[in-house]
Amino acid sequence: MKIRFGVQMLLLLWLFVPAATPWAADITLWDVAGKVEISLEQTAGELPSPGIVYVGESHDNEEHHAAQLAVIRSLNQRKRPLAVGLEMFQHIEQSILDAWVARQLSEDEMRRAFARNWSGEWWYLYREIFIYCRDQNIPMVGLNVPRSITRKVSRGGFASLTTEEVGKLPFIECRVDPEYEGFLRRVMGGHGSDSGFRRFCEAQLVWDTAFAIYTLEYLADHPERTVVVLCGIVHAWKKAAPEQALRNKADVAQTVIQPSVAGRWTPDSVSKEDADYLILGLEE
């Protein structure tokens, strides 16, 4: 069953159906190591418990968010102790997420907080995930750093941050897998100096490392839980945030689920060094 909601339908659901998101119990995934198709229900039984499950996204793709909700719901129906980690919320605003799950925040207040942290125009894409977590009492965890920090690193490097800005992040330097470096250089388009690339690389690693550190911090306090991390496809790549988590805690159990993307994330092009599963049927 292919998940597709038009923008207009999502807006109608937003206005008139508070918590009635259909979900795809029969989503098909590609098992990268086994080179075989497998259902989401089969996959859910193999996901780490406790541990980290990354589910990548293109931020403006409604199908990707519907698939993320399907993963969360499948694990929840197995009575797994869960939490949902969010790239789209700053760690310093954790109290907002706690209030939302505790039903102490209205949806309008949550929408305004989401706009402050991410983008007001994208709330409808994430709304059903937020509603489900609230209704099922699933903790939501902010994993991001303030944008001012990544902007400062991109201009002056990680060393330009103050002790207060660094917070719990370890020292960050541009030490990445050659394939990840090649990806970052392609993003830069071959422009800029070596020092410019280093600053750009360090800014990217601030995101990867923050997602890893704050997820591990939550797991240290809640060792029985599986944290489903929702973040961009590049951050969910095994060479990105999962690699930073391993550097900080080598025995953490992790699984990476990525949406299939034509020309980049397909059964023929992805190896087990990239991801563990692909969600099929999402190619554009």
Image (spheres, grey):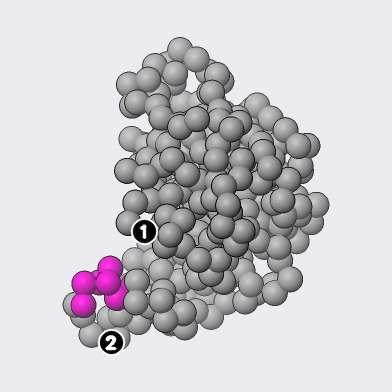
Q: Is residue 75 magenta?
A: no
Q: Residue at x 41, y 76 (%)?
A: 179
Residue identified by numbered label 2: 194
User: Is residue 14 positioned above or below 45 on the image?
Assistant: above
Q: Residue at x 32, y 21 (%)?
A: 8
Q: Position of residue 138 (x, y in %)?
A: 68, 37
User: Is residue 17 positioned above or below 163 on the image?
Assistant: above
Q: Residue at x 35, y 82 (%)?
A: 198
User: Is residue 191 positioned above or below 279 on the image?
Assistant: below
Residue identified by numbered label 1: 264
Disc 1 crowd rating (10 Å Cα; few below 14, some 14-19, many 20+) is few
Depth check: give the residue in front, 271 or 133: 271
What secondary structure is the magenta-colored segment mainly? Answer: helix
Q: Position of residue 57 (x, y in %)?
A: 44, 48
Amino acid type, label 2? Asp
Q: Which stretch did the figure color magenta? A: 184-190
Task: Please say whether residue 198 is visible from this viewpoint.
Answer: yes
Residue sitting farthest toward the left: 191
Depth check: give the residue in front, 48 or 221: 48
Amino acid type, label 1? Arg
Q: Residue at x 44, y 18 (%)?
A: 13
Task: Please say whether residue 167 is visible from this viewpoint.
Answer: no
Q: Quadrant of the C terminus?
A: top left
Q: Position of residue 148 (x, y in %)?
A: 38, 62
- Per the image, label 2 sits on a secondary structure element best described as helix
Depth check: give the residue in front, 274 or 9: 274
Disc 2 crowd rating (10 Å Cα; few below 14, some 14-19, many 20+) is few
Q: Position of residue 75 (x, y in %)?
A: 69, 40
**Label 1 vs 2, first from the N-terminus:** 2
Residue sitting farthest toward the front: 36
- Per the image, label 1 sits on a secondary structure element best described as loop
